[in-house]
Structures are given as structure tokens and as C-alpha cells.
Amino acid sequence: MIQAKAVISNGQGKFELTTINVGKPGPGEVRVKIKASGICHTDWDSIQNWNKNFIVGHEGAGVVESIGENVSGLAIGDKVILNWAIPCGECFQCREGNLHICEQNSPVCGCGLSGHAHIESSTHNEDPIERSFHLGTMCEYAVVKSEAVVKIDSAISYAAASIIGCGVMTGWGSVVNAANVTVGSSVCVIGCGGVGLNVIQAAKQSGAAKIIAIDINEERLEQAKKFGATQGVVASKTDIDFVDVKAKVRELTDGRGADYAFECTAIPALGSAPLALIRSAGKAVQVSGIEQRIDFDCELFEWDKIYINPLYGMCNPERDFNRILSLYNNGDMKLEELVTKTYTLETLSEGLDDMLNGRIAKGVVIIDSSAEN
Ligand SMILES: [Zn+2]
Ligand SMILES: [Zn+2]
């Protein structure tokens, strides 16, 4: 048992920094010393809505500190990225290759919390405390299933590594795994925050010839160009049907519409917007996970358009994290640049506020800045 600082929420809008006890890893589990944890809109959502006590955070990187029985392929001291969609490797969807929607472990079947053996290993005031997405990365130590970590071999900072396992993967994988963007194609990206910037850099890596960034904020469009956008279109908050944006995109795509459009805003009213921007038989991708009911004009699907809603960039963690790091190691993927600002466990509320007000691409909580590993 070790003591660890942790951010705990009641899932009703409140959170506090406190000290918890973290037990030894059980069979099939490892204990990770967390070095950095990304701050995500899902964290904000969980703090507001989950309505139970839990350790906050689901994007993390750190070092394997101890290992339970029956764990292979990991050693103490390994540098790892945590992964919140933990594949069992045995169920129908895992066998189909859809590791991100594993039927046994997927957080999308509920609210991100469900019965797992290791939940008992962390206690707060003697009571077992659950971990967000079975990870709870805003804590100095996390006991997790060994399948929830991917060992990495890269000089990348822990701050930049921590965001691979959510925002980076979601944007990048939506392009590479879900839409399969082709060489020479045209791509629209609606919303140029942390996820949108990863859509843009993945489209560039895929050889897209035109990458049209769309945002209400001109500064964000300038930043998008640094990540590979070839054109920028300023959207107006009042043009919710995207009449002006659609006209500009048509102009830029020989009057036809783009081959692909990605929605990365999490604004429900924009759920149908990518359909308005693509050509017939183009692909519209809803990246941000909108779940609300909205009105859809079925004409938007004309003709032969495809609308997909991939989860987590259809992540295969071992394969994809290593691909992303290869691109990073070769200088073809900007990851350090995505981390606009860092915080501590004590200043998490400042980070959440910066995120909610669009002041940062991605904020990261540095939990342990010592140089070991
Ligand atoms: Zn996230
Ligand atoms: Zn499975």
C-alpha cells in the first residue's frame, strides 16, 4: 500500500485534491507511477455528470512501478502510455479487430465506470474508490490491467505522450483508420482545437492535397496552418447551417464539395455539417462524439454519401500508438507543440477553465516532473 495524491470528484460538479491509498497490483495488473495526465472535455463531463465518487482522468503516461502475477511483456521501469479502451482480446468485437469497442471492457457500454477487480485496490477514507475509465490518471499512482498500458520507446516528453491515448488518437485515427483519406484528396476540418489539429496533421501525412480548416477563431486557423492546413475559412457563429462556409468550400473544390469532412467541435447543431461540405459519394466523419438528438435533412445524404461516427479513431493501441510515435520520431507528427500549457494537480481547475474557454489546444497536468526514465 502506498499513499498517493489524487483528484477525486463526486460526479456532481465538485472535485478535490486529496490523499488516497493505492494497493499492490493483482494478477494481470500493473502499478504505474503517473508522470503526466492530459485534460479532456470528457473529464469535465465526468465531473459534472457521473454522480458517484471516482478518481478523475483517463489520459496518462508514466513508468511501470510494480507488476502483478501473470503479466508478460512488461518490466519495472518501462515507459508507458495508458489506454482507456482496454481490449480483452477474446470477445466477438476483439476477434473482429474492433479492439476499441471490446464487448467486455468497453467504457461506452456505460458511463466509463464498471466492476473491475482492481477497483478494490485504491481506497479513500477506507472506502474503495473507482477510477475514471479504469485508469484515474490524475493521481500519482494507478493500478490498471496490463492490457491498459502500451510500452513505448521514444524520447517524447511524458506530457506529449499522455495525450496520445485520447485526443491525438481520436483525431488521427478518424483519418487513418476510419475515413482512409487518400493521396491527392480534399479534406475539410470543422473545429481546430486539440482533436481537429490531429485530423489536420493526419490528413497531411495521408497525402491530402487540400486541407481546409474551418473555425470561428482566426488565431486557431493560423495555428491549423502550422499543422498542415492549406486553406482557412472563418465561420460565423450565426451561420449554423453553414451556408457561407459551404459556398466557400465549393469554391475551393471545383464547385463539387470536398472528398472528406470531419466534424471536431462537439457542438450538437453541427452534427450534420460535414455532410453539407462533401461531394456526392464523399465521406462525412463525426469525430467529436455528439449524442444529442438533432434534425437531419435527408437531402444532405444525396447522393451516395457516407456518414461515419468512429469511436476513439478505431484505436488498436499497440499498433497505433507505435505508428504515431514513429511519425513523431521522424519529425512528421507534432505532439510537443499540441501541449499549449501545463498545470499541476493543485491547478487543475485553471486548466479546465482554459480548456472550456478555448484558450488552449491541449492542457496537461504534470504529476511528477523528476527526470528518472
Ligand atoms: Zn479524453
Ligand atoms: Zn474484447
Image (spheres, grey):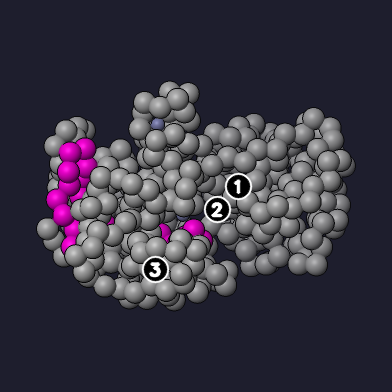
User: Hey, what amino acid is under mark 1?
Assistant: Val
Q: Nearer the viewer, mark 3 or mark 2?
A: 3
Other residues around mark 3 within 10 Å, as few (<14) / some (14–19) / many (≥20): some
- Whichever of callouts 3 and 2 sits on the residue coming sooner in the sequence is 3
Q: Quadrant of the N terminus?
A: bottom left
**Residue 73 seen:** yes
Picture layout, residue 195 above or below residue 175: below
Q: Residue at x 26, y 72 (%)?
A: 18
Q: Residue at x 16, y 65 (%)?
A: 3
User: Hey, what amino acid is under mark 2?
Assistant: Val
**What is the span of residues highlighted in magenta in the rendered image?**
21-44
Q: Which mark is residue 195?
A: 2
Q: Nearer the viewer, mark 3 or mark 1?
A: 3
The residue carrying mark 1 is 287
Q: Secondary structure at mark 1?
A: loop
Q: Residue at x 35, y 32 (%)?
A: 88
- Whichever of callouts 1 and 2 sits on the residue coming sooner in the sequence is 2
**Alpha carbon of mark 3 to alpha carbon of mark 2: how far?**
27 Å
Q: Which mark is residue 10?
A: 3
Q: Residue at x 27, y 51 (%)?
A: 119
Image coordinates of residue 192 in percent, x first then y, are 62, 57
**Alpha carbon of mark 3 to alpha carbon of mark 1: how far?**
28 Å
Q: Secondary structure at mark 3?
A: loop
- Residue 318 shown left or right of residue 62 in the figure: right
- Residue 298 shown left or right of residue 144 in the figure: right
How many numbered circles does the render carry? 3
**Residue 356 quadrant:** bottom right
Q: Is residue 23 magenta?
A: yes
**Residue 328 quadrant:** top left
**Alpha carbon of mark 1 to alpha carbon of mark 2: how far?**
8 Å
Image coordinates of residue 76 in percent, x first then y, are 15, 45
